[in-house]
Image (tube, grey):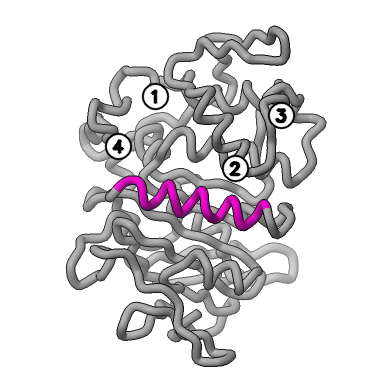
Amino acid sequence: MDDRSAADGSLPDPRDGRKHRRPPTGADPATRTPMLHAVGLGRRLPAGGDRPARWIWRGLDLDLHPGESLAVTGPSGTGKTLLLRALAGLDPLDEGTVYLEGRPQAAWAAPLYRARVLYVAQRPALFDGTVADNLARPFTLAVRRGRAGARGKEGGWNGEARPGGRQGRAFAPGMALAARIGWGEGRSRVVEPGFDRERALELLAALGRDAGFLQQPVTALSGGEAQITALVRALLVEPQVLLLDEPTASLDPATARAAEALVARWREAGGGRACIWTSHDRDQLRRVAHREVALAPAGGPLRRGGL
């Protein structure tokens, strides 16, 4: 693992020695307890055909502090997506432990953990229906509908770990919308509690989409429009940690910059928010990240340095 940052908190640019912005106040590991803390992580691919079993990464440590934006980098095949999915509790680990707020991942009820730590895929999974259906869908889940694990008055999440540290059930993939969305004169009428249509329209407008975009069937969306939908959905549910896996890969440069600004605004709006990015665009990572964790090629040594 390569955990890079200059002594003054800026990011060195190996091309010309330029330095980039400092980490946010309070993100210094020496002064703050990490929100997300990973120790000794290892992921092993089993043998298959003529391919021997191998470790993708092993002995990987990672800390993410409040207010911080972290880049995970490395060549293709180093397991960046697998790492983000493991941090989100979506993929298993062969070794190591992930902690959220000092509590092991396995001690959290799965819906509560995933409401706090949200993974946004490069090719997002969208449900049948319209863009609006997809934006409202998370608010049909118990964790966001005022029952155990829903947001409290201060915007935090309630809920306790399951007895004996057992992990709760994941979200039911077939759960239907509890309330539907009706259309009239080009405007939507969303009756799903918690879904903020006006906020959704603000986010879409920042990404160059008008109210009519809400009515688009997801089957008609381009790859970039699917990414817009997934990012807006993630920002609407306001997690504590966003794990962003190439979230703007299919967007034009202007829209990608707008998406970066929205994520930065979300992160800076609450003191207990942080994010991790992956991207093949090094210039983008220099814009959005305070420091870097670099994964080595499979079988190679973990290395250290800076963006």
Mark 3 Cα-neighbour bin, 10 Å: few <14, some 14–19, many ≥20:
some
**255 to 57, vertically: above or below:** above
Q: Is residue 203 magenta?
A: no
Q: Which is nearer the N-term, disc 2 or disc 3? A: 2
Alpha carbon of mark 3 to alpha carbon of mark 4: how far?
41 Å
Query: Residue 67 appears in which quarter of the rendering?
Result: bottom left
Please say if 103 is above or below 162: below
**Disc 3, SS:** helix
Q: Amino acid at mark 4?
A: Arg
Q: Disc 4 or disc 2, which is closer to the eye?
A: 2
Amino acid, disc 2: Ala
Furthest residue toward right: 220
- Regarding residue 55, the answer to whether it shows in the image is no
In contact (CB < 8 Å): disc 4 and disc 1: no
Residue name at image x 49 percent, y 87 percent: 18
Q: Earlier in the sequence, mark 2 or mark 1?
A: 1
Q: Above or below — where is 178 with respect to 132?
A: above
Q: Would you name the residue on which mark 4 appears?
A: 166
Circle 4 Cα neighbour tier, 10 Å, few/some/many (<14 / 14–19 / ≥20): some
Work out which residue is located at the far left of the displayed protein and give it: 31
Span colored in magenta:
255-270
Q: What residue sits right under mark 1 in the picture?
A: 144
What amino acid type should be assigned to the residue bearing mark 1? Arg
Name the residue tied to disc 3.
213
Is residue 259 something that shows in the picture?
Answer: yes
Tell me the quarter of the picture where residue 116 sits. Answer: top left
